[in-house]
């Protein structure tokens, strides 16, 4: 009997031990689940940016970088995208196509899943070839040349060059600014020449005579006296400058020296002229330019954005900043419409967001009710500003 009892006690111990071993399995599974949950909670969307933050076009790229940071901070504070936070990394391309491609590769190595960029046209066209190969969703805030969005994975916030050129002519004609117009443009730049070509085509429909059309190139963009003299001699009432702000500042200085004081009209490339070093802002008085954003607008969204930008960077945002801010919220809207998650591949995210862009509508700083066509172009009403007392004023 004692032997039997001992055997029963031993058996009980074995069963208890086995039960103890068995009970450890759920505890281990629970630990693994907790680890997986923690990993999922730590997952983020990696969104890259590319633009010039050094060099001649740094005003544009810096504004885009700063505005993108503000938008990301806001989105993350509000819960992120589909519950996931955003990681942001911005690379400098110095407004150079080759450096932009290098920046793209750097961001790919980092793990970028979506690209907001590039800022200027030539680099954007080069990078678009790469995003197309990877089917990475790309939205440029300010790349205006047509090839920037030639592939179905690429979209833009701004108007294209053709739209800016034709819109400028329509604006001049509608408001009867001038009947005789001179043009100085950069024939070596796709942005400038693209705007000019479409301006010239629409000018005929608006009863505008282009009395002089003078060009320059990237190799010869410091002395504009010959072009300006021809414009002055032609009797032009308005000088159309579809160029960037650095060259425009030189032209205004040289025109003033020559006593040539026509109406000056430009496109978004002139945005930044007030920040040119050693430039007399008085020379830009009454200069008009097409732009989707005026920092002095009284709507609450603009006032909030301008206030945050001023507080964080001690600067007033330009239209490039507004475009970039809108671009981040467009990315958010498309990712939410597409139900994207960080574990999806670049290709999966790209495909889903391309489809989402066909259906979303976004109210932004640069336009209300923005939608996109299948070819990546934005639908929104154009706006213009005029420089008064050294600041942009809505028109």
Image (cartoon, rainbow, N blue to C red):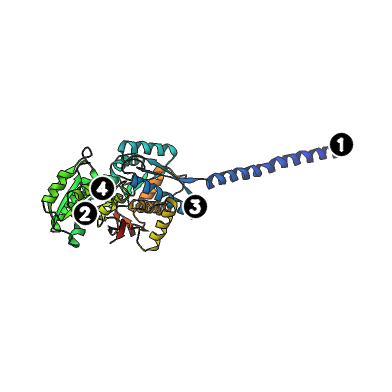
Compared across the picture, whether 192 is left or right of 51 comes to left
The answer to whether residue 339 shows anywhere in this view is no
Location of mark 2 (residue): 264
Residue at 54% x, 44% y: name it. 39
| Sooner in the amino-acid sequence: mark 4 or mark 1 | 1
How many residues crowd mark 3 within 10 Å: few (<14), some (14–19), many (20+)?
some
**Looking at this view, is 353 or 224 the one in front?**
224
- The CA distance from mark 1 to mark 3 is 65 Å
Callout 4 secondary element: helix
Instruction: State the CA–CA distance, disc 2 to disc 4.
Output: 11 Å
Closer to the chain start, of discs 2 and 4, is 4
Circles 2 and 3: CB distance less than 8 Å?
no
Q: Position of residue 385 (x, y in %)?
A: 28, 58
Residue shown at 53%/47% (left/top)?
41
Residue at image mark 3: 83
Q: Is residue 239 visible?
A: yes
Can you identify the residue that label 4 sits on? 249
In front here: 230 or 370?
230
How many dots with numbers? 4
Nearest to N terminus: mark 2 or mark 1 = 1
Q: Which mark is residue 119?
A: none
Q: Farthest right residue?
A: 2
Q: Which residue is mark 1?
A: 3
- Depth order, front residue of 180/106: 180
């Amino acid at each position: 009997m004692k032997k039997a009892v001992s055997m029963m006690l031993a058996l009980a111990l074995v069963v208890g031990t086995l039960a103890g071993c068995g009970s450890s399995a759920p505890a281990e599974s629970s630990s693994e689940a907790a680890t997986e949950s923690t990993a999922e909670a730590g997952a983020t969307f990696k969104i890259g940016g590319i633009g010039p933050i050094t060099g001649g076009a740094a005003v544009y790229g810096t504004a885009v970088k700063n505005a993108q940071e503000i938008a990301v901070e806001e989105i993350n504070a509000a819960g992120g995208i589909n519950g996931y936070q955003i990681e942001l990394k911005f690379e400098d391309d110095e407004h150079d196509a080759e450096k932009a491609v290098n920046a793209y590769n750097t961001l790919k190595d980092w793990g970028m899943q979506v690209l907001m960029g590039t800022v200027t046209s030539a680099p954007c066209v080069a990078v678009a070839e790469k995003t197309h190969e990877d089917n990475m969703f790309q939205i440029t805030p300010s790349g205006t040349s047509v090839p920037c969005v030639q592939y179905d994975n690429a979209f833009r916030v701004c108007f294209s060059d053709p739209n800016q050129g034709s819109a400028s002519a329509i604006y001049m004609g509608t408001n009867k600014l001038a009947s005789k117009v001179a043009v100085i443009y950069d024939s070596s730049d796709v942005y400038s020449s693209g705007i000019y070509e479409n301006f010239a085509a629409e000018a005929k429909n608006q009863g505008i005579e282009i009395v002089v059309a003078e060009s320059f190139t990237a190799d010869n963009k410091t002395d504009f006296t010959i072009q300006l003299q021809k414009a002055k001699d032609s009797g032009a009432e308005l000088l159309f400058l579809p160029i960037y702000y650095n060259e425009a500042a030189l032209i205004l200085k040289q025109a003033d020296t020559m006593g040539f004081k026509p109406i000056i009209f430009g496109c978004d490339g002139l945005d930044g002229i007030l920040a040119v070093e050693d430039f007399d802002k008085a020379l830009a008085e009454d200069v008009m330019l097409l732009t989707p954003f005026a920092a002095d607008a009284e709507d609450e969204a603009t006032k909030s954005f301008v206030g945050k930008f001023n507080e964080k960077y001690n600067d007033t945002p330009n239209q490039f900043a507004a475009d970039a801010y809108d671009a981040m919220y467009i990315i958010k809207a498309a990712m939410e419409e597409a139900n994207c998650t960080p574990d999806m591949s670049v290709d999966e995210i790209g495909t889903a967001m391309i489809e989402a862009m066909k259906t979303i509508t976004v109210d932004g700083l640069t336009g209300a009710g923005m939608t996109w066509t299948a070819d990546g172009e934005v639908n929104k009403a154009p706006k213009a500003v005029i420089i008064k007392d050294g600041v942009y004023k809505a028109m």
